Image (cartoon, helix red, strand yellow):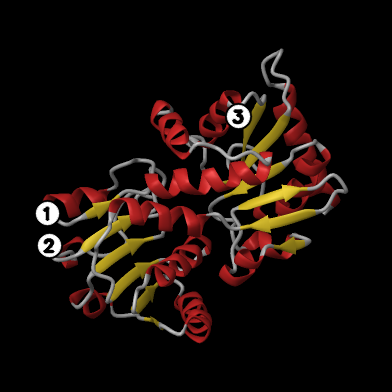
Amino acid sequence: MRDLQQQSIDALQAMLAARPAGRGSDILVGLLGRGIQSSRSPIMHEREAARLGIACSYLLLDFDALNLPDAALPSAIDAAAKAGFVGLNVTHPFKQQILSHLQSLSAEARAIGAVNTVVFSSDNKNTGYNTDAWGFAQGFKDGMNGAALDRVVQFGAGGAGAAVAHALLELGVKDLVLIDSDAGRADALAHRLDKTSGQRVRAEGNVESALETADGIVNTTPMGMAKYPGLPFPADLLQPKHWVAEIVYFPAETELLRRARALGCRSLSGIGMAIGQAVRAFELFTGKTPDRNAMASHFEAAA
């Protein structure tokens, strides 16, 4: 563990030392994940902070680029705190792994069972939050108003999937079907949500039968990302009657969205969720209320 901790500290110190001269900061924030070099989070946070008169540096703590194993996660959290970070965003594959390495959780993060935002306090305490659920819900309300919610099939039951499932139930989905490559993970999430939500949530293994009667489809897996091209299910199962929502935002048009739009399906990209979760995270990091429209503009500028 000491070797991993030193490796994490060395990687962070090298990153901080490599920053251009003169980049002093009022606040230092980072993103923990793998394969995150294309993230637009740095520009969203830094530009909105500058608009509000705050000097912010947002760094990518990419475990792939830093050649760190998953086991270095707790050491990286500790190293970030010691380096003076005010907080971290968390993405694939750490949104659930990080739970056991945090000292406290917000009520929403505890209910969802996943964290995408960590805030460090001045007394070296850390608290995990989830802003993904709110971000997805806001994006859905903006782009899919009036969509049928009787039966929705969600692919993915990981950290992002748990947040989106929580949001879908709050949006009014009556029957939520979860499909995941790890059947046990889908079963566990379905059991927890079915017991606490009062709505019908169940895991399913038969993709074809699940999609046959679905109103909508949500992809919360990494499939569609530049690093994981493709679809989470066979393309010929997609029908014009389905609406389709993504949480992947890079590329903005995934293979799933491209095929859905070609069929005439109503569709929603992952951009709304990406912006929405950042709005809430920014407020947690800075204590300031950001402008959602301004952050959307920063997001587009990052393209």
The residue sitting at 21% across, 48% down in the picture is 258
Secondary structure beneath dot 3 equals helix
Nearer to me, 186 or 53: 53
Residue 176 in the image: x percent, y percent?
36, 76
Secondary structure beneath dot 2 equals loop
Q: Is residue 294 left or right of residue 244?
A: right
Secondary structure beneath dot 1 equals loop
* N-terminal label among 1 and 3: 3
Q: Quadrant location of the N terminus?
A: bottom right
Nearer to me, 69 or 191: 191
Residue 186 versus residue 301 in the image, above or below: below
The residue sitting at 19% across, 54% down in the picture is 260
Nearer to me, 60 or 302: 302
Q: In the rendered image, which residue does mark 1 sit on?
A: 264
Which mark is drawn over residue 49?
3
- Dot 1, crowdedness within 10 Å: few (<14), some or many (≥20)? few
* N-terminal label among 2 and 1: 2
The residue sitting at 34% across, 40% down in the picture is 251
Task: Find the distance from the CA under tag 1 to the CA under tag 3.
Answer: 39 Å
Task: Specify the amino acid type for callout 3.
Answer: Ala
Which mark is nearer the camera, 1 or 3? 3
Is there a contact, CB below 8 Å, between mark 2 and mark 1?
yes
Q: Is residue 259 left or right of residue 155?
A: left
Which mark is nearer the camera, 2 or 3? 3
Which mark is drawn over residue 80?
none
Residue 123 can be seen in this image:
yes
Residue 167 versus residue 43 in the image, above or below: below
Residue 254 in the image: x percent, y percent?
29, 47
